[in-house]
Structures are given as C-alpha cells and as structure tokens.
Image (tube, rainbow, N blue to C red):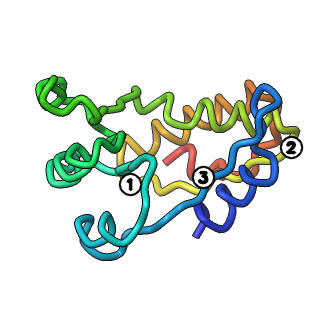
Amino acid sequence: EGFGDFFVSFLNQNGSVADKVHRLNVTYCQDSFRQCLGAHDFDVVVVGSESCEQIKLLAEEKEIPNLHCSGANPLTWTSQTPYAFGLQLPSTLYTQQVIRQAAARHLTTAVMIRDGDSEFQRLSAVSASEWIRESGLKLIGPSVSWCTQ
C-alpha cells in the first residue's frame, strides 16, 4: 500500500532525529471516525484530505491534535477548535522535504509514476523531478514522450 508497508516501516527502522528514536504506530480507520475514536487510543489524527468538520469536532472533544491536509481556508481555523490545524503548501512543494529526507538517508534512486491528465499532475511531476535532481538522486521516469505531451 506504500504508506503502511513502506513508509512507516522505513521510518520505524531509521526514525531517529537528534539522537532520539521515533516510532509510528498507525491505525487505519475503515469505519466511521466516531467508531474508530471509541475503539483506539490516539495521540494525533492526520486527515489526508480536505478538512472534515466531524473529525475536527470529535477530536476536539477529546483534546486530540488533528492535522488536516489541504486545510487552506483560514476561516475554518478558529479559537473554537484550538486542537485543529490546517496545513497547506503550494503544490510544487508537496514532495520537496520527503525527497530531501530520502537523500539525507542515503537513498539513491527515485521512480516517477504520474498521470499527465491535468495541469496539477504535470506540475507536480516537474516539481518532484527538480527536487530529485537537486537532491542528487537518480530519477527513473517519466519518459520523454510523457514530458512532451
């Protein structure tokens, strides 16, 4: 699946920062968030899509920090929900820090798999290619024909 079977295991094997070891213990909530919250103990919630008001409010009740990716609307983040945070980067920077960490951890090769169906996907691929080049990693793909479509 990528995140669970690669990223989490890689981080848990190599996850030290400033001589402190950090481990991720990931729980996937397949049911409703309310059911998941009742069945598991959480330290933080990361919402991988636009902010979800239900998750924000339920996590707030339990005083659980909750981070919402693509949370760009500043009007939704108020003092009424001090445990909720919206994160937003320009899309050209989405992959920059992950690629820099890969290089810092002495990984050597990156593969690029991207659709070219939208301007966002093309821009994302070009940006990631630049971060890969800048970090000194070897890039596999995309093909010349993909780049010139």
Q: Which of 122 and 70 is in front in this view?
A: 70
Please provide percent x and percent y for residue 3.
Answer: 58, 60
The residue sitting at 58% across, 70% down in the picture is: 1
The residue sitting at 38% across, 41% down in the picture is: 120
Specify which label sits upstream in the sequence, 1 or 3.
1
The answer to whether the residues at label 3 and label 2 have Cβ atoms under 8 Å apart is no
Q: Residues within 10 Å of mark 1 (few under 14, many from 20)?
A: few
> Could you say which quadrant of the image residue 81 lies in?
top left
Q: Mark 3 = which residue?
A: 145
Please provide percent x and percent y for residue 52.
Answer: 20, 50
Mark 1 and mark 3: span between their CA atoms?
14 Å
Q: What residue type is labelled 3?
A: Ser
SS at mark 3 in the image: helix
Q: Mark 2 = which residue?
A: 108
Q: Mark 1 = which residue?
A: 117
Q: Which amino acid does label 1 sit on?
A: Asp
